Image (cartoon, helix red, strand yellow):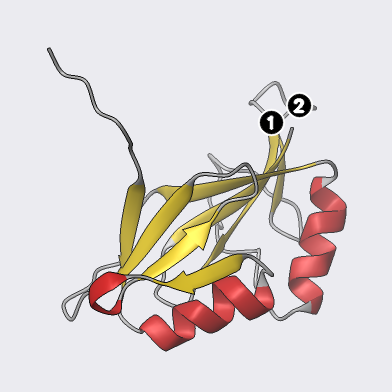
Amino acid sequence: MFAPVHAFSGFSVNDIEAARKFYGDTLGLQISDGEMGMLQLALPTGPQVIIYPKEDHEPATFTILNFVVDDVDAAVDELNSLGVQTKIYDDPNLPTDEKGILHGRAQNMGPDIAWFKDPAGNVLSVLAG
């Protein structure tokens, strides 16, 4: 029977030091050094994610991390003040406002959510809890 004792997720980046600065300094998350040049990212609820260098990295075309916040508008304002661009989609199927927020609740399209990218081009989001 399959019986794991621990589980974690991971994703690649093309520049570990840029990832360390973005996730640690810009987003204020806890980062520590892992094995073989990897980083360990501690998520607010306790689990960890590994970030590993990959020379032929290709950014994920889907959201790799979702950060639940109390107020999406306030989170987007804070991210924008830190230089993080949240207006990354210009798609009629994702009708976002001028700050990149999809007001999903008001449009019966799921949660209020805004997407942004890390320095490696991976897609992240903030969404209402």
Residue 80 picture location, percent across and down:
76, 72
Measured along the vertical axis of the image, is residue 121 above or below residue 128? below
In-image side of 65 versus 55 (left or right): right
Residue 13 picture location, percent across and down:
33, 73
| Disc 2: which residue | 105
Mark 1 lies on a secondary structure that is loop
Q: Do the residues labelled 2 and 1 touch (CB within 8 Å)?
A: yes
In-image side of 38 versus 98 (left or right): left
Mark 2 lies on a secondary structure that is loop
Measured along the vertical axis of the image, is residue 60 above or below residue 110? below
**Badge 2, how many Cα within 10 Å: few under 14, some, many 20+?**
few
Q: What residue type is labelled 1?
A: Pro
Q: What residue type is labelled 2?
A: Arg
Label number found at residue 111: 1
**Residue at 73%, 27% in the rendered image:** 107
* The C terminus sits in image quarter: top right
Q: Can residue 53 be seen in this view?
A: no
Q: Seen from this angle, which residue lies furthest top? A: 1
* The N terminus sits in image quarter: top left
Q: Seen from this angle, which residue lies furthest front? A: 5
